[in-house]
Image: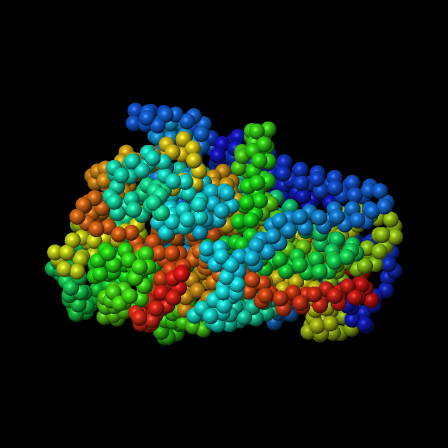
Amino acid sequence: MSVSPVDLPVSRGTKARTRGAIEVAADDSTKTGRVKKRLTSRRATFAAVIIAVLWTTPTFGLLISSFRPAEQIRETGWWTFFANPAFTLDNYQDVLFSTSSSSPQLGSYFVNSLAIAIPGTIFPLVIASMAAYAFAWIKFKFSGPLFILIFALQIVPIQMALIPLLQGFGTILRPGQQWLHDVVPFIPEQNYLPIWIAHTIFALPLAIFLLHNFISEIPSEVIEAAKVDGASHTQLFFRIVLPLALPAIASFAIFQFLWVWNDLLVALIFSGGTGDVSPLTQRLAELTGTRGQDWQRLTAAAFVSLVVPLIVFFSLQRYFVRGLLAGSTKG
Amino acid sequence: MRSPHRRYTAPIALFAVAGLTLAGCTGDIAAEEAADADCSEYEDYGTFEGEEVTIQGTIVDVEADRLIASWTDFATCTGIEIDYQGSRDFEGNIAQLAEGGNAPDIGIVPQPGLVQLLAENGYLMPAPAEVEANVDEFWSEDWKAYSVFDGTFYGAPMLASVKGYIWYSPAEFEEKGYAIPTSIPELMELSQTIADEGDHLPWCAGMESGEATGWPGTDWIEDFVLRQAGPEVYDQWVTHEIPFNDPQIVEAFDAAGEILKNPEFIDTESLISTPFQDGGLPILDGECSMHHQASFYEVNWGEGVEVGPDGDVFAFLMPPMSADDPIAVTGGGETVVSFAEGDAITAVMAHMSTDTFANLRVSEGGSVSANNGVDSANASSPLLEQTIEILQDPEATFRYDGSDLMPGAVGANSFWKGIVSWLSGDSARQTVDTIESSWPS
Amino acid sequence: MTTADLIGKLIQVIGGLAIFAAVVGLILFLVDRAPKRGRDYWQLAAFVAPALLLLVSGLIYPAIRTTYLAFLNRDGDFTGFDNFVWAFTQPDAVRTLINTVVWVVFVPLLSTSIGLAYAIFIDKSRGEKFFKALVFMPMAISMVGAGIIWKFVYDFKSQGREQIGLLNAIVVAFGGEPVQWLQTSPLNTLLLIAVMIWIQTGFAMVVLSASIKGIPLEQIEAAELDGASAWQRFTNVTLPGIRTALVVVVTTISIATLKVFDIVRTMTAGNFDTSVVANEMYTQAFRANEVGRGAALAVLLFLLVLPIVIYNVRVLAKQREIR
C-alpha cells in the first residue's frame, strides 16, 4: 500500500517488476555507495551517536561491573574502575564453572536453551507466515474479523493461559510422550515438545499480525501476475511471498529467538518437574543463592546469556536486504 | 536470493558448533562414586531399583548441593533416583503446576500458608503414617501443628531458621563496654547510649527486596507482637481471630517504630531503598552497631568475615520484654509435602523426616533443623549451634513467621506494602487499617 | 549430561524439525493437488487451520476462562461484578489506572520515534550493524540483567556515603543532594517508563529499519534528483513507505506496555505510587491468591486495548479498500 508521491517516475511494465526485484537487489551494493554521501549528514551522525551513547552507557556499566570484585560492586560506582582498576574474572568463573551437584554443567543448560529456542523460533514463524499469507491474499468470509481477533489475542497474559494449557497437555500430550519414550528410548519421557508448543502458541498473535502487515504490502500486481501464470497458493507462498517478506521474517525471527532464549516462566511450567530440559535462564536465576546473597554474579550471567542472541542478531542482519520490492510500486 | 541454501547454513552451523564445543564440557563424569556408602541404616526402606522421585523447592545453588548431599547415601542404597529441581519461583508456580497436573512428586514448601492453600485445593496427599510417626517422635507439638489442616497431617518440617536475631560487632561491644541487653527496655537504653555517643547510629536495616520489599519489617512487627502481647494473641492475630488493626498490633508497630522511625537511631531515609542483603554490612565499617535479621543472614556477610562470639560479627536473640520472661522466638522453615503416592515417595518422605537425615543435613553446614534428634555439635557455626539449642529448648516458645501463615493477600502483599507506607510516613493506625481491609473475607 | 543425553537431545531437535517440515510440506503438497472442486477451500484450510487450532486451544479458551473467572470469588462462587467493583474502588485504583495511561502514552510514542530516528540516521552508514546492535542490546538482555543495570543508575545512598548509582553520582558531583529516584512520586513512574523505552526502542529500530530497506531505491533517488531536502525526503518518501510498519510497531509496543509488570515488580514492587494494572493483576492472581480479582483486571486490560484494536480495524479496512 505504499503510496508514492505523484512526481516520482513509476514506469516499467508489470512483467518487468517481478524480475526487477532480483536485479535491483543484485546491484544494491554499488548504489548504496553512491547514495551514502548525500544521506548521512553531520547532524544526523551526531544525533545517532548521542542515542547510541545514552542507550549503551547503562549496559556498559554492567559490563565493567562484571569484571569487578564483589565488595567493590556493592560499595563503589562502576566508573571508579577507571581511576582504581581492580580486575577479576571471578564472576565469570562462578557463572561458567561453578559446579554444583544440583546443576552440574552449564553446557547441559546451554544445549537445552538452544534445543528449545531453535524450534521455538522456527515453528511459529512457519505457521504464522502461512496464516499471514492467507489473511493477506486469500479472500474468505470473516477474514477481517478473524484477523482482528487474532491480533487482539496479544493482550491475553501468558500467566492466564498456563493452567488450561497444562491440563490439555496432561491429557493429550503426556501419553504421546510416554509412547515416544517407549519406542525410542533415547528420547526421555520429559522432552521439549510441550515447551515448543507453548512457545509457538504464545508467539502466534504477534507473529501473524506483524507478518501480515508486511506480506500484504507486496504489490498486488506481483501476485496477480503470478496467478495469471497459473501459480497455486503454495507456489505463490514459497516463490514470491517468502522471499519478498524476508526482512520482516528475519526481524521477527530475531525477536522470537531472544524472547524464547530469555524465557524462564514457560520453561519452568512446562518442564515437567525435572531438570532434564531446563534452559540456561533457570541456572542463571538460581546463581544468586537461596537468600539472594550472591547477586553480583548476575552481572556476568547477563553477558553470558547475551552472546547467543547477539550472534543470531548479526547473522540474520544479512536478510535486511535493500530493494526487494524495487521497481514494483503501485501508482 | 541467489544462493537459496545459504540461508540455512547460519543456524545449522551455529547449532553444530555449539553441539560440538559443548560435548566437550558436558563430560561423562556422572558415574556415581558413592559405591562405598554404609547401607545398614537404610535397609528397612527396601529397594526400589530404577524408580525416580522428583522433588522441587525454593532451595538453590550451594544450599541445594548440601540438600542433595544429605540424601545421596539413601538414594544409592535404596536405588531411588531422586531428581531435585530448585527454583526461586517455586512458590509462585507450584499452585499452577499442581492445577495443571504437572506437579513434582514431592514439594519442599517454605510457607505453611502455601501448604494450607495447596491442601485446601486438594493437591496434596496426606502424609504417610511413617512420616507422622517420625514427626511425633522428633518434633514439638508447635511444629507439627503447622502442617495440620482440617485434622489432616500433610508433611514433616525440614530445615528451620530463627528470625529475631540482632547482629552486632563483639569487638565494638567489648571495647565500649556494652552488655548484651536482656530485656527490651535495656535494648532501648543501649540504643540511646550509642546514639548519644554520637559517632554513628545504633541501628541499620535494609527493606528493599524486589517484589517482596518490606518483608524485613514484618519480622520486626512479629517479634514485638510475640514479646509484648504473647503467643496467644500472636496466634489469634495470624489466624484473624482478632483483626489486624487490634490495638495490641498497633502497639507492636509503635514499639518497632521507636527504632525504625527514629532518625536518631537509624537512617530513616535510606532504610526502604537499601537491599536487605546489604542491610547489616555497615556494622563491618563501624557505621552502625546493630542489625535485626534472621539467622540465615550469616550467608550475607561475605567472604572473610568471621561469624562467632569472638569474630567480626555475631548475633544475640532479641530479648523478651523483661529479663525473667521466658524465651519466645519467631522463625521459619520448610515443609515436605507430596503431590503423588507411591512406595518410593513414601520412603523418601519418611527418610527426610528422620533424625538421621536432619543430622546429615545439619552436618553439611549452613542450616539447622528443629528435629530434636539433631546433635547441636553437628552445626557448622557457633550461631547455628545456638539456634539448635533454642529450637530444642522445651521452655522456649516457638512461633512461625506470621506473614508466612497469613493468607497470601496479606502475608505476601498488603503486609509488605503496609510496612513500606508506614516507613514512608503513614501512621501505625492508618497502616493496620489498610492491611485489615485487604484481609480476604 | 552424558553423551547419550546429548544425542537424545539432538535427535529430538532434528527429529522435531524434520517431522514439522515433512508435515507442513506434505499438507501443502496435497492441497496443491486437491481436486479442482473445493481446492480453494482446502488450500485456505491448510494455511489457516494450524494457527487457528493452536490459538483456540492455547489462547482463546484461556481468555474465555479468564473472563469467566473474573465473576467468581476466591471460593469459586459467582459474585457478579464484585471483582470489577473492587478493581475500581481499591485504594490505589485511580493511581494505577492513571499510571497505566501514562505508560501507554509515553512508551510507544518515544520508543517508536527514537527508534525511527536512529534507524534513519544510521541507515547505510558505515558500521550500521554495529550501531544497530548497540540499541538492540537492551532488548536481548534478560529482565534479571536489566534490573541490575538500572540499579546501577537509580541507586540511592544517603548523603555522605559513596553513591553507586550513576544518576546520584552525577547529582553529587555537581554539588547536589542525592535523590531517592525510585521512591519519589511521580518522578519514579517516569524513570520506570524510561527503562521500558530503553528496551522497546530496539524493537522499533529493527522492524522500522527492515521496512526502510523495503522502500524502492529509485523513489529516493528520484526525490534527490528533484532537489528535495532530507526532511522532505523523509516526509514524502520514507514515511509513506513505512506507514504499515509504523502502525505495527506502535500497536505492538502499546500492547506490550499495557502488559508490562516485571519492570515495576522488580524495581519498586508497585510501591510509592508506581503500580500499573498489569502489576496489580499479577499480584492478585499469583501472589495474593485472588484469582477472580486478577482475572477482572485482565479483562480490564482487554478493554483498555480496544481503542488500539479499533484503530487497527480502520487501517485494515482502508488497506483492503485500496486493493
A220 lies above or below B343: below
Residue B4 placement (x, y as % from top left): 73, 45
Q: Which residue appears at 34% of the width and 68% of the height?
A: B433
Residue A215 vs residue B214, the one in the foreground: B214
C245 lies above or below B338: below
Quarter residue A73 falls in: bottom left
Residue B116 in the figure: left or right of residue B313:
right
Residue C142 vs residue C296, the one in the foreground: C296
Residue B255 placement (x, y as % from top left): 23, 66
Picture colour scheme: rainbow
B193 lies above or below C57: below
B136 lies above or below C307: above
Quarter residue B434 falls in: bottom left
Residue A108 placement (x, y as % from top left): 49, 39
For residue B181, say whether it is visible. Answer: no
Residue B364 placement (x, y as % from top left): 29, 38
Q: Which residue appears at 41% of the width and 27% of the height?
A: B48
Residue B373 vs residue A320, the one in the foreground: B373
Residue A31 vs residue A266, the one in the foreground: A266
Q: Which residue appears at 82% of the width and 67% of the height?
A: A331
For residue A171, say whether it is visible. Answer: yes
Looking at the rendered image, the quarter that the C terminus of chain C falls into is: bottom right
Residue B106 in the figure: left or right of residue A135:
left
Q: Which residue appears at 38% of the width and 71% of the height?
A: C179
